[in-house]
Image: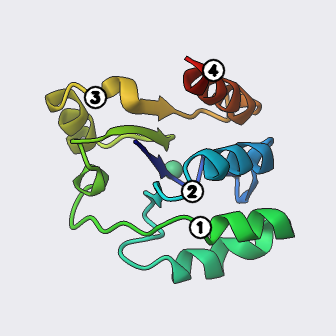
Amino acid sequence: MTNIYLDIDGVLLDDGKPAKHVDDFLSYVLEEYPETTYWLTTRCNGDASEVLRQIQPLFTQDTQKLLEMIKPTSWPMVKTQAIDFSQAFLWYDDQLGWADEKALKDHDAMDSLRRIDLESNPDQLNVEFEVLKQRNLE
Ligand SMILES: [Mg+2]
Protein backbone atom coordinates (compact mmCIF):
# COMPACT_ATOMS: atom_id res chain seq x y z
CA MET A 1 0.00 0.00 0.00
CA THR A 2 1.19 3.50 -0.78
CA ASN A 3 -0.27 6.65 0.67
CA ILE A 4 -0.32 9.70 -1.56
CA TYR A 5 -0.22 13.17 0.02
CA LEU A 6 -1.06 16.19 -2.11
CA ASP A 7 -0.38 19.84 -1.57
CA ILE A 8 -2.49 22.28 -3.58
CA ASP A 9 -0.78 25.63 -4.15
CA GLY A 10 2.30 25.22 -6.31
CA VAL A 11 1.38 21.60 -7.04
CA LEU A 12 -2.18 21.19 -8.35
CA LEU A 13 -2.56 24.95 -8.75
CA ASP A 14 0.01 27.15 -10.43
CA ASP A 15 -0.55 30.80 -9.53
CA GLY A 16 -4.12 29.97 -8.57
CA LYS A 17 -4.95 28.22 -11.85
CA PRO A 18 -4.99 24.48 -12.54
CA ALA A 19 -1.43 23.35 -13.25
CA LYS A 20 -0.65 21.89 -16.67
CA HIS A 21 -1.36 18.12 -16.87
CA VAL A 22 -3.23 18.21 -13.55
CA ASP A 23 -6.24 16.33 -15.00
CA ASP A 24 -4.11 13.43 -16.26
CA PHE A 25 -2.06 13.38 -13.09
CA LEU A 26 -5.07 13.27 -10.76
CA SER A 27 -6.95 10.75 -12.84
CA TYR A 28 -3.99 8.38 -12.68
CA VAL A 29 -3.37 8.95 -8.97
CA LEU A 30 -7.01 8.35 -8.04
CA GLU A 31 -7.33 5.34 -10.30
CA GLU A 32 -4.28 3.74 -8.68
CA TYR A 33 -4.77 4.97 -5.12
CA PRO A 34 -8.52 5.60 -4.71
CA GLU A 35 -8.51 4.77 -0.99
CA THR A 36 -5.16 6.20 0.05
CA THR A 37 -4.89 9.68 -1.44
CA TYR A 38 -4.90 12.53 1.09
CA TRP A 39 -4.79 16.29 1.19
CA LEU A 40 -1.68 17.72 2.80
CA THR A 41 -2.20 21.44 2.47
CA THR A 42 -2.67 24.45 4.68
CA ARG A 43 -6.13 24.69 3.13
CA CYS A 44 -7.21 21.47 4.86
CA ASN A 45 -6.84 20.58 8.49
CA GLY A 46 -9.36 17.90 9.39
CA ASP A 47 -12.15 18.76 6.97
CA ALA A 48 -12.08 18.43 3.18
CA SER A 49 -15.28 20.35 2.49
CA GLU A 50 -13.63 23.77 2.76
CA VAL A 51 -10.89 22.77 0.30
CA LEU A 52 -13.50 21.59 -2.16
CA ARG A 53 -15.47 24.79 -1.78
CA GLN A 54 -12.35 26.82 -2.51
CA ILE A 55 -10.81 24.95 -5.41
CA GLN A 56 -13.39 22.66 -7.00
CA PRO A 57 -14.91 25.36 -9.25
CA LEU A 58 -11.51 25.90 -10.88
CA PHE A 59 -11.39 22.40 -12.33
CA THR A 60 -13.18 20.47 -15.08
CA GLN A 61 -16.21 18.40 -14.09
CA ASP A 62 -14.35 15.10 -14.33
CA THR A 63 -11.56 16.39 -12.13
CA GLN A 64 -14.06 17.86 -9.67
CA LYS A 65 -15.30 14.32 -9.02
CA LEU A 66 -11.74 13.11 -8.47
CA LEU A 67 -11.09 15.87 -5.94
CA GLU A 68 -14.01 14.57 -3.87
CA MET A 69 -12.19 11.24 -3.45
CA ILE A 70 -9.23 12.84 -1.69
CA LYS A 71 -9.32 12.34 2.07
CA PRO A 72 -8.66 15.02 4.69
CA THR A 73 -5.74 14.99 7.13
CA SER A 74 -5.20 16.79 10.41
CA TRP A 75 -1.89 18.05 11.64
CA PRO A 76 -1.58 20.15 14.79
CA MET A 77 1.64 22.00 13.86
CA VAL A 78 3.48 20.68 10.84
CA LYS A 79 2.39 18.68 7.82
CA THR A 80 4.53 15.64 8.57
CA GLN A 81 2.41 15.00 11.67
CA ALA A 82 -0.26 13.78 9.25
CA ILE A 83 2.07 11.34 7.48
CA ASP A 84 1.89 7.66 8.38
CA PHE A 85 5.59 6.78 8.35
CA SER A 86 4.81 3.08 8.86
CA GLN A 87 3.53 2.94 5.26
CA ALA A 88 5.14 3.67 1.92
CA PHE A 89 4.14 7.11 0.74
CA LEU A 90 4.69 9.82 -1.83
CA TRP A 91 4.31 13.45 -0.85
CA TYR A 92 3.90 16.10 -3.54
CA ASP A 93 4.79 19.56 -2.27
CA ASP A 94 6.52 22.68 -3.50
CA GLN A 95 7.83 23.89 -0.15
CA LEU A 96 9.22 22.15 2.86
CA GLY A 97 9.39 23.62 6.34
CA TRP A 98 12.49 22.84 8.42
CA ALA A 99 10.51 20.71 10.87
CA ASP A 100 9.04 18.70 8.01
CA GLU A 101 12.46 18.26 6.46
CA LYS A 102 13.82 17.06 9.80
CA ALA A 103 10.92 14.61 10.20
CA LEU A 104 11.53 13.18 6.74
CA LYS A 105 15.24 12.83 7.45
CA ASP A 106 14.61 11.27 10.87
CA HIS A 107 12.42 8.65 9.18
CA ASP A 108 14.89 8.23 6.33
CA ALA A 109 12.07 9.22 3.99
CA MET A 110 13.46 12.07 1.88
CA ASP A 111 12.99 9.83 -1.19
CA SER A 112 9.24 9.90 -0.58
CA LEU A 113 9.11 13.64 -1.13
CA ARG A 114 8.36 14.67 -4.71
CA ARG A 115 9.39 18.30 -4.73
CA ILE A 116 7.34 20.22 -7.27
CA ASP A 117 8.71 23.36 -8.89
CA LEU A 118 6.29 24.52 -11.55
CA GLU A 119 8.17 27.76 -12.03
CA SER A 120 11.23 25.85 -13.27
CA ASN A 121 9.20 23.19 -15.06
CA PRO A 122 5.55 23.99 -15.82
CA ASP A 123 5.22 20.45 -17.25
CA GLN A 124 6.41 18.73 -14.10
CA LEU A 125 3.08 17.01 -13.37
CA ASN A 126 3.51 15.16 -16.64
CA VAL A 127 6.93 14.01 -15.46
CA GLU A 128 5.43 12.95 -12.13
CA PHE A 129 2.69 11.06 -13.93
CA GLU A 130 5.34 9.13 -15.91
CA VAL A 131 7.48 8.51 -12.81
CA LEU A 132 4.47 7.12 -10.96
CA LYS A 133 3.47 4.91 -13.88
CA GLN A 134 7.00 3.58 -14.12
CA ARG A 135 7.09 2.96 -10.36
CA ASN A 136 3.90 0.89 -10.61
CA LEU A 137 5.27 -1.21 -13.46
CA GLU A 138 8.34 -2.23 -11.48
MG1 LIG B 1 2.34 24.66 -1.68
Between tags 1 and 2, which lies in front?
Answer: 2
Q: Label 3: how many residues lie within 10 Å, few (<14), some (14-19) or many (20+)?
A: some
Q: Say which label, 4 or 1, has the lower sequence index.
A: 1
Q: Is residue 24 left or right of residue 106?
A: right
Residue assigned mark 1: 69
Which labelled disc corresponds to residue 39?
Answer: none
Q: Which is more toward the observer, 8 or 26?
A: 26
**Mark number, residue 109:** 3
Q: Quadrant of the C terminus?
A: top right
Q: CA distance from mark 2 to mark 4?
A: 18 Å
- Tag 1 near tag 2, CB within 8 Å: yes
Label 3 vs label 4, nearer the camera:
4
Looking at the picture, how far across and down is residue 133, in whole percent?
65, 27
Mark 3 sits near ligand 1, with its Cβ under 8 Å away: no
Where is residue 125 shown, x and y percent of the image?
Answer: 69, 35
The answer to whether residue 67 shows anywhere in this view is yes
In the figure, residue 76 lies in which quadrant?
A: bottom left
Give the label, 3 or 2, closer to the camera.
Answer: 2
Residue at the top extreme of this rendering: 138
Sooner in the amino-acid sequence: mark 3 or mark 4: 3
Which circle's residue, 3 or 2, is located before the other in the chain? 2
Residue drawn where x is 44% and y is 70% of the image: 44
> 10 Å neighbourhood of mark 4: few (<14), some, or many (≥20)?
few
Instruction: Please give the name of the residue rendered at 65% of the width and 66% of the height, measured from the top-left corner.
Output: 67
